[in-house]
Image (cartoon, helix red, strand yellow):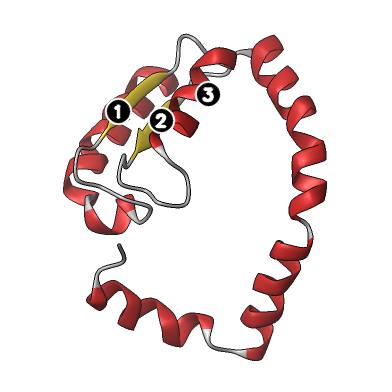
Amino acid sequence: RVPPDLWKLHWPLMDTPVRRALSVGLMEKLKANLDWFPRYQGYLREQRPPALILWGPKDEYMPEPAARAYLRDLPEAELHLLNDAGHWLLETHFEVALPLVRRFLGEVLH
């Protein structure tokens, strides 16, 4: 569920002709995205980039199993499920996410 304050913040940013057209274009390309996934998964398996996965289990667009699916291709990835977070995790749980991101980048970029 999108908090009302977040909706009020984002809607004026999205409600422009250009951004509406971008959103429609994104939806029109979903089939191409599905066709692209096997290449993306191959890249992850072969290159094994360091990965931090922050996920909101209450995300109704991308449920928790989608987060765990990344671990099939990136078994060394660091997965954090932020209990009451949803799709807008960075907006709603920034204070929890920030130290995780800082620590991860500190380790990876040392």
* Mark before the other along the chain sequence, 3 or 1: 3
Asked whether the beta carbons under mark 2 and mark 3 sit within 8 Å of each other, the answer is yes
- Hey, which quadrant is residue 44 in on the image? top right
* Residue density around tag 1, few if under 14, some if 14–19, many if 20 or more, within 10 Å: some
Name the spot of residue 67 as percent of width and height, x first. Answer: 45, 30
Name the spot of residue 101 as percent of width and height, x first. Answer: 32, 35
Task: Decide if residue 66 is on the left or right side of residue 29.
Answer: left
Q: What distance separates the C-alpha of mark 1 from that of mark 2?
A: 6 Å
Q: Residue at x 25, y 42 (%)?
A: 98
Q: Nearer the viewer, residue 95 or 39?
A: 39
Asked whether the beta carbons under mark 1 and mark 2 sit within 8 Å of each other, the answer is yes
Q: Is residue 74 above or below residue 30?
A: above
Q: What distance separates the C-alpha of mark 2 from that of mark 3?
A: 8 Å
Q: Residue at x 23, y 51 (%)?
A: 94
Task: Decide if residue 3 is on the left or right side of residue 17.
Answer: left
What mark, if any, has residue 53 been given in the picture? Answer: 2
- Hey, which quadrant is residue 55 in on the image? top left
Secondary element under disc 3, as helix, strand or loop, is helix
What residue is pinned by disc 3? 70
Give amino acid for label 1: His
* Mark before the other along the chain sequence, 1 or 2: 2
What residue is pinned by disc 1? 80
